[in-house]
Image (cartoon, rainbow, N blue to C red):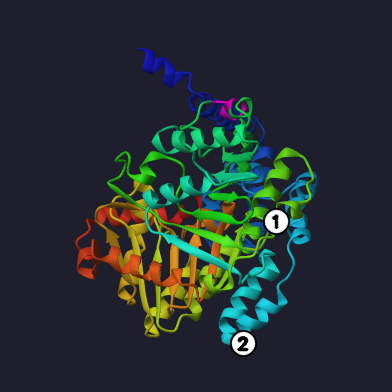
Amino acid sequence: MKSIIKIIYHRISLIVTALLAQIVVLIAVISTFNDYFVIFYWISIIISMLAVIYIINDKINPSYKIVWIIPILIFPIFGGLFYVFFGGKKLSNREKRNMNYITNKTIEALEQKTKVLDEIKSHNETAAIQSRYIQDYGFYPPYKNTKSEYLPLGEKKFERLKEELKKAKHFIFMDYFIINEGVMWNSILDILLNKVKEGVDVRIIYDDIGCLLTLPYKYNKKLERMGIKCCVFNPVIPILTTRINNRNHRKIVIIDGHTGFTGGINLADEYINEIDKHGHWKDSAIMLKGEAVFNMTVMFLSLWDYLRGIDEDFSKFKNTIPLEEETCNGYYQPFADSPLDDEPVGETVYLNSVNKANKYIYITTPYLIVNNEMIKALISAAKGGVDVRIITPHRGDKWYVHAVTKSNYKILVESGVKIYEYTPGFIHSKTLISDDEYGVIGTINVDYRSFYLHFECGVWMYKSPSLINMKKDFMDTLKVCKEIKIEDINKIRWYRLLLGSILRVFAPLM
C-alpha cells in the first residue's frame, strides 16, 4: 500500500495527471465550440490549411513537417489548433533576449584561432573546412596545446574522474543530464563535499526531466545546503508547452580550467555496470588536458550564468599553466549545440564527416533514428566504396525507439552499410571515427532529439592519438557484435516491420 501511495503522490504522477487534465479540457472546449458554432468549424479548417502552408514553407526538417501535416490532415478541426498551441518552437522576444546571452557570452569569451586553422589547413583542407565551420557557426575555436585520454568504458571514466576531482584546487564544474543516487554518484558526492570544505568552488547543473525519476524533488536545495551551488535546467511545470522537449543532454566536467571530461556517461550506476539494466552497458568518454578545455569552461559558464541570472568574467576561469609541448599531439575542438537557433551544428558535423570520408567511417550510437539527409549520406558513402560500419544495441532501453532503429536497417544494409548489434546488451557510446584522422566523441546521438531538440556537446578531433584508441575499441567491440545481414532482416515478422514503419513517421517526436 505504501508503494502505491508513493507512486500516486510522486512528482511525475502529479505532472502527468495535470497535463492530461489540460489536454482533456482543451479537447472538450474545442468540441463544444464545434458542436454549437458552424463558424468555428470553418475557422478551424482555415487555421489547419494555414498551418499546413506555414509548415511546408518553414525551414524545419522535412521529417518534422510530416509529423505535423499527417495529424492535421486526419483531424483538420483539431490538428491546426493543436499546432498553433504546441507545434512551434518560436521564442518570445523576452526569451530570445535571455537566450542570446549564452551566444553573446560565448562569442565574447572565445577568440578565433586563425593560426591554428591555418596550420590545420596546411595539413588538410578538408579538416580545415570542418574546423572553420565549427568556429564560425558554433563559435568554438580549435586548439593545439592539448592532450587527450580516451576512456572506453564507464568504469574507466569513473576511476579517472575520481582521481582528477581529488586534485581540484580552485573549482569544479559539472553538467549532467542524469544523476542518480547510488555507488557512482555517492562516491563522487563525498569527494565534492570534501572539496567544498577545502574552499573549492563546486557547481552542478542537472536536467529536470533527466533526473525526474532519479533525484528527490528540490534536490538542488539539498546540495545548496551542503555548500554545492546547483541549478536545475528547464524545470518541469505541469503546463502544456513544447519547451518541455528542449533538454540539457550534456555531460561535462571541468576541473580548475585545465582538465575536462565529456562523453555519453551519466552519473548513474548502470553506466558503470554496478547494476544490470539492459545487459552489459558499453559507453565511452574522453578526458582533455590543456587549452581546449576553455571551450568546455565557456560552455558551462554561459549556461550557468544564464540560469543563475549573473554575469561573470569568464577569463578568470581560464587555465594559464601551459602543458609540455612534447606531450601534446593533434588538434581539438570542443563544441556545443543548441536547439534554440537555426544552426544544427551536431548534425552538420556528422554529415560533413560522412560525406568527406575516403576510406572508412565507424559510428557507435544507441539510437539510429536517421532523417533522409543522413540516410543518403551513409548510402552514398557506402556505394562509393567507403567502409561504413555502425554499432547499435542488441537490447534497447526503449522498445519503440529500438523498433525505429531496426526499421532503418534494411535500406542501409541493402546499400552496403554494415550494421552490427552489441550482443552483450546496450551500447550507449556516441563516437565517430574516420580515415584514422578525424573523430567526434560526446553526447550526440544519431537521432532527431540530439540534432534538433537537445542542448548537446562534443569534441571534434584531428590527428589525435586518441583516434587510434577509439578505432581499436571499435574493432574490439565488433568481436562481440552480430552483423545484421539482409537475410536476418527478411526473417523479421511482417507486423513488426509494419509497426516500425509506422513509428518511423513519428520518429522526430521520440
State yes or no: residue 218 in magenta: yes
Residue 296: image location, x then y, percent: 62, 56
Q: Disc 1 or 2, which lies upstream in sequence?
A: 2
Residue at 64 percent across and 47 percent down: it is 45
Q: What amino acid is at disc 2?
A: Ser
Q: Is residue 97 above or below residue 181?
A: below
Residue 452: image location, x then y, percent: 57, 56
- Foreground mark, 1 or 2, reads 1
Residue at 73 percent across and 62 percent down: it is 110
Q: Is residue 224 above or below residue 1?
A: below
Report the span colored magenta. Answer: 217-222
Q: Main secondary structure of the magenta part?
A: helix
Residue 311: image location, x then y, percent: 79, 45
Let me know if residue 6 appears in the view.
yes
Q: Quick one: quadrant of the N terminus? A: top left
Q: Which residue occupies the foreground of this view, 445 or 441?
A: 441
Residue at 53 percent across and 70 percent down: it is 327
Mark 2 — residue?
Answer: 122
